[in-house]
Image (cartoon, grey):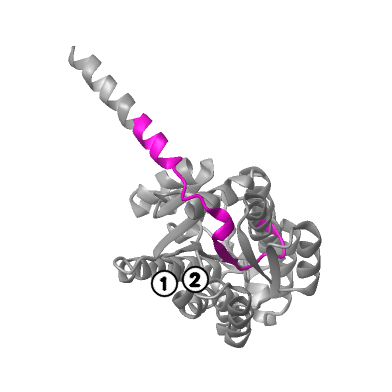
Amino acid sequence: MWFLVITSFIALLFTWKWLRNRQTVGNYRHRYVMITGCDSGFGNLLAKRLDDLGFHVFAGCFTQQGIDMLNKETSDTVQAIQLDVSKTESINSALVNVIASLPKDTGMWGLVNNAGIVGSPAPVEWLSREDYQETLAVNTFGMIEMCRVFLPLLLKANGRIINMSSIVGRIAMAPAPYTISKYAVEGYSDVLRRELYRRGVTVHIIEPGYFRTNIADPDTICNALTNKFNSLSTHMQIYYGKEYVEKAKKRIRTGINYVGSPRVHLVYEAYIHALTAKHPHHRYLVGNDAKLLFRILWNLPEWMSDYVLGQGRPIPAAVQT
């Protein structure tokens, strides 16, 4: 008897949750969304999908080529604009373009901070202040500045902010500049969500695992590692050795090719839910690796996760001898 009652309750709970997750805000044709990083990847796919749904989209592109391609592939409700999130003057210019295109007394429903770069894939001993600044300028400070500049429009529409983080914002598994930038995204988003709690704007975080996109191209990352090694002092090159570089490159290719998922649609579907659901989630873990493998890793004691993540990591030649 009790087993039947408990089973029925669990079934009803999951059914209620399933139905709740599928309730949408509707009225898409009167909603305006700003997206950064639309030249390719998740941002590009999201702009096209929102276009299909009827949203008005301002698609920030870093390059003129990205603007031209998106204009060809979307309807007139998508306006591709030049945007470099690492520069405040570019963000302010984008705001002027957006305000000029919005109907009078209309706010913005969504701000999607999607733009991001991998940055230098090198170990910490190779990295300079500039290496960190380059990555943080886009992944962290660009996101922060976009939120600051566009917040008045979002408050006017009781809109939503969606920030792209990563599973490495939960557990350090990537090179330092990228990992630090995503930990900062998590912290900033949590603070912002609580500050805006009673002001009508909600904040949501996307935490993908590894996906095969342009930002995770193994050739590009490996070439960046080689170039960084070649720029080191002779002493540092001898200390690490060329074998270190080759092993590191092999590890990068193996990780992307075997762990990286081709199901990139899962990420922009998380974006879509965050923008359209009546009851969006605070966080979206995206990908089986994020939901299963990495969830286990970040809940393990540090000595255990350190051991697992340290397996196969190359060490400098001088240390081996």
- Residue 20 sits inside the magenta stretch: yes
* Image quarter hosting the N terminus: top left
Q: Are marks 1 and 2 in contact (CB under 8 Å)?
A: yes
Magenta residues span 14-41
Q: Position of residue 97 (x, y in %)?
A: 64, 79
Q: Kindly tell me whether residue 77 is visible in this rendering.
A: yes
Q: Position of residue 111 (x, y in %)?
A: 52, 66
Q: What's the residue type where badge 1 is placed?
A: Leu
Identify which residue, 307 or 104, lies in the foreground: 104
Q: Residue at x 49, y 62 (%)?
A: 162
The residue singled out by tag 2 in the image is 107
**To which quarter of the image does residue 189 belong?**
bottom left
The residue singled out by tag 1 in the image is 155
Identify which residue, 316 or 170, lies in the foreground: 170
Q: Is residue 228 left or right of residue 182?
A: right
Identify which residue, 212 or 164, lies in the foreground: 164
Which secondary structure, mark 1?
Answer: helix
